[in-house]
Amino acid sequence: MNERNSISYENTRLADYTYDDSIERGNVDIPFTMLSLLLLTIGVVMVLSSSYARAYYDVEGVTGGNGTYYFVRQALFALCGVGVMFVCSRVPMGFYRRVSFVVFLTSIGLLVLVILIGVVGGGARRWINLGFTTFQPSELTKIGVILYFSLLICQQKEKMKTIKGLIPFAAWLILIFALLAAEPHVSAIVIIAALGITLVFVGGANLGLFIGGAVGAGVLGGLAYAFLPYVRDRISAWRDPFSDLADTGWQVVQSLYSIGSGGLMGLGLGNSRQKFLYLPEEHNDYIFSIVCEELGFIGAVLVLALFALLIIRGYWLAMHARDRYSCLVCVGITTLFALQVILNVAVCTNSIPSTGISLPLFSYGGTALLLQMAEIGIILSMSRDIPEQK
């Protein structure tokens, strides 16, 4: 019997975050790997279908009339992402623990940098120009929060039920919120707030403090509504998108037209009508609307079912993690995916105000896709440490 098989599951499931890298590791979790690759493949195909018209008419002035411009770039990033996923799956969890604070501080520094030299788009300064592509530091901040908060929870697990123990988490979150509000980037604030509250709650904070955090998040939402005019505009468009059809309600209405046009079976892959420059961001934030239009209700439900299986499997792996740190990291990454899927679909169906949240593995964006594949690789790395059942 090898060393991995000899590990006692009951004694190590939530052990302290210590690692022996000499212990033989097993294989990656096959169901999680296959679900990830299947969703990635469908996502790349949908980028081709949804972006062809915009790229052909060269609306952004960058494609040169090449209809496959966005697809080729996304496919290349997807191939690189698969490589990144497998590399990250080979790195022991002990390494992620050791570099978690460095990743977190780097993400904070990039948030400061984007305010100073960031690229402006859509009225917000959220991107750093890398020359060959742009990079959104808030995406790195999400994984930075997951890695570092998981470490911090392990370090002071005895204090997690006290207000004093939660002060470091609150202080870091307030700093991040202030930097994101300066861009502004409300959707990232919502996601990072939810991630922070979830990790703290899973890490041992009592229900009262958890409710207090939720109330604090509600207060932040109220402040955003009071002081950020574009937040009020989006809420008005959500409540009655047809009241300002030529401006704030245009995107929402076109998304609803796209979803309604799909019916039960859809118009067929590649046959969307709304992608012909009616629906803005059709290959990015609103790609799910094109999925509904071309694949219909049945196709959209199947895509959501695949995401649901991926998320459920992620939480299953977290429940079987070898140690507390791995468990928390897996919960954080899985929750991140779940939040983005739920919020993106809610935005496309006008269930919540438009927030600019992309659909993981589907929405166009090279650096974001690479980070998502790296996050999947971290979960797969954790899955290799799960003791085999005797």
Image: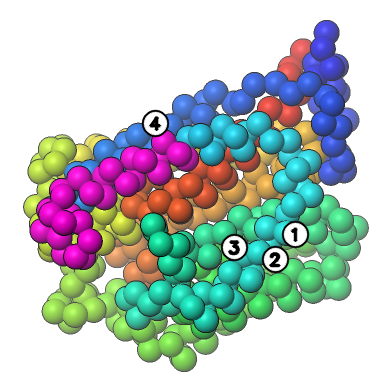
Seen in the picture, residue 54 relative to 291 is either above or below; the reply is below
> Which residue was labeled with disc 4?
38
Please give left or right for residue 236 compared with residue 108 in the image: left
> Which residue was labeled with disc 3?
141
Q: Are marks 1 and 2 in contact (CB under 8 Å)?
A: yes
The residue positioned 12% from the left and 63% from the top of the image is 278
Marks 1 and 2, how far apart at CA: 6 Å
Please give left or right for residue 74 compared with residue 14 in the image: left
Q: Are marks 3 and 2 in contact (CB under 8 Å)?
A: no
Please give left or right for residue 249 compared with residue 312 in the image: left
Residue at disc 4, secondary structure: helix
Seen in the picture, residue 81 relative to 210 is either above or below; the reply is above
Instruction: Look at the image and give the residue range highlighted in magenta.
Output: 55-81
Q: Residues within 10 Å of mark 1 (few under 14, many from 20)?
A: some
Please give left or right for residue 373 compared with residue 173 in the image: left
Residue at disc 1, secondary structure: helix
Q: Residue furthest right?
A: 158
Work out whether mark 1 precedes mark 3 in sequence or the reverse, and give the earlier one: 1
Q: Are marks 1 and 3 in contact (CB under 8 Å)?
A: no
| Residue 260 percent location from the top left of the image | 16, 53
Query: Label 3 sits on what residue type?
Result: Thr
Single out the mark in the foreground, 2 or 4: 2
Q: Quadrant of the C terminus?
A: top right
Quarter of the image for residue 134 reads bottom left
> Which residue was labeled with disc 1?
101
Work out whether mark 1 precedes mark 4 in sequence or the reverse, and give the earlier one: 4
| Residue 362 on the magenta span | no
Q: Are marks 2 and 4 in contact (CB under 8 Å)?
A: no
Marks 3 and 2, how far apart at CA: 9 Å
